[in-house]
Image (cartoon, helix red, strand yellow):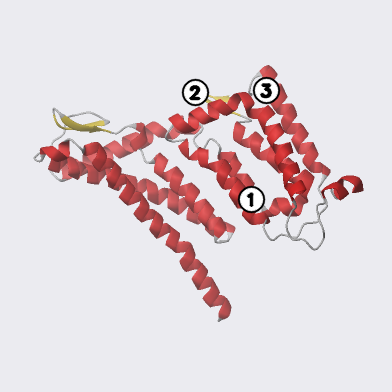
Amino acid sequence: MAAPATLPGRQADWIEAPRNDASPDWRFLSAIVLVAGVGLWWMLGPEAHGLWTLWTTNGLASIGILIPAVSIVLTVRAWRGQRWDHRGTWWGLAICTAVLLITWLMKRQGAPLLLYRDVGLVLFPDGIRVFLYVSGVVLLFAGSKAYRAAFFPIFLLLFLNPAPVFLVNLVDLPLQYVGAHTARAFAQWIGVPLAVDDLRLMFSPALGMFIAPGCNGLRGALAMGFLTLIVGYLYRMPLWLRGAYFLSGAMLAYLLNLVRLCLLVLCYRVALNFEPLARHMETADYILGSLIFFSAAIFLFALPRKWNSLSKQHANS
């Protein structure tokens, strides 16, 4: 297969920086930001408000508000110190054109859906279109070398909506029941009588807890999963180890949510005989969750540092 075509000399000269300069000049960065900004605004202008509403009203998807900023910061970090030849490829223009064409068709005909029983999957959600378009812009102006250097930060744009509806509908209710049954079993184990209700644990007629969707552990698992992805990238862990690290972080966060529910049952048991605590159970829940999450994060973030230290020791031996 023939090698990808490069931009003609006149355009390459327009964005070319001095060969002894290891950083892109302002014209190069401005071209990328301008073309990406105009295209993204045309694609997502009417939908940007929907994304903002999703991030600010949906606790499960709220982590998505950090994705654009994190992607930009990590991209600048990846390109800093790189030597630039500024030889873009026409494949980038082809990708941008295809994405814009798909968006135009979606605006006229509606988003294509893949339906299976009661689950509907949007084939070209915002994250995929943004990822492909930004990828095309970088390939067009900077070429494959710069794209490979910034692939992970651009890849994060896929998760502008980290909790798509089909995923939430698939796992939300089962995880709620797992949390409720775990808390109920722990309450019975410590001898606390409970009223019969699948998702509601009543310790007294006026004191009880409801295992709401936000208590199913999915929010903490998503947050910890993204943190481990970024930390694994920053420490340059091998791809297979990065995947195992991500899965371990998400699973640990979910299991610790079950621990949080059990500790909350203990707090309710104490609150039965201590009225001041009964009036502040919501605050106690936030404190327990924060302490458990940050303790787990400190433990997980220490693992890449330990791996990095062992790798250096092995390389020096």
Q: Could you say which is closer to the camera, residue 96 or residue 66?
A: 66
| Left or right placement of residue 262 versus residue 53 in this view | left
Of all residues, the one furthest to the bottom in this rendering is: 317
Q: Position of residue 69 (x, y in %)?
A: 56, 44
Amino acid at pointer 2: Asp
Can residue 200 be seen? yes
Residue 38, quarter of the rendered image: top right
Mark 2: few/some/many CA within 10 Å (<14, 14-19, 20+): few
**Labelled disc at residue 75:** 1
Q: State the separation of the CA atoms marked 3 and 1.
A: 29 Å
Amino acid at pointer 3: Met
| Left or right placement of residue 220 versus residue 114 in this view | left
The reply to whether callout 3 and callout 1 are in contact (CB within 8 Å) is no
* Residue depicted at x 39% and y 58%: 298
Mark 3: few/some/many CA within 10 Å (<14, 14-19, 20+): some
Q: Which residue is mark 3?
A: 106
**Residue 192, placed above or below residue 249:** above
Mark 1: few/some/many CA within 10 Å (<14, 14-19, 20+): some
The reply to whether callout 1 and callout 2 are in contact (CB within 8 Å) is no
**Labelled disc at residue 118:** 2
* Residue depicted at x 91% and y 46%: 10
Of the two numbered discs 1 and 2 on the same chain, state the one appearing first in sequence.
Answer: 1
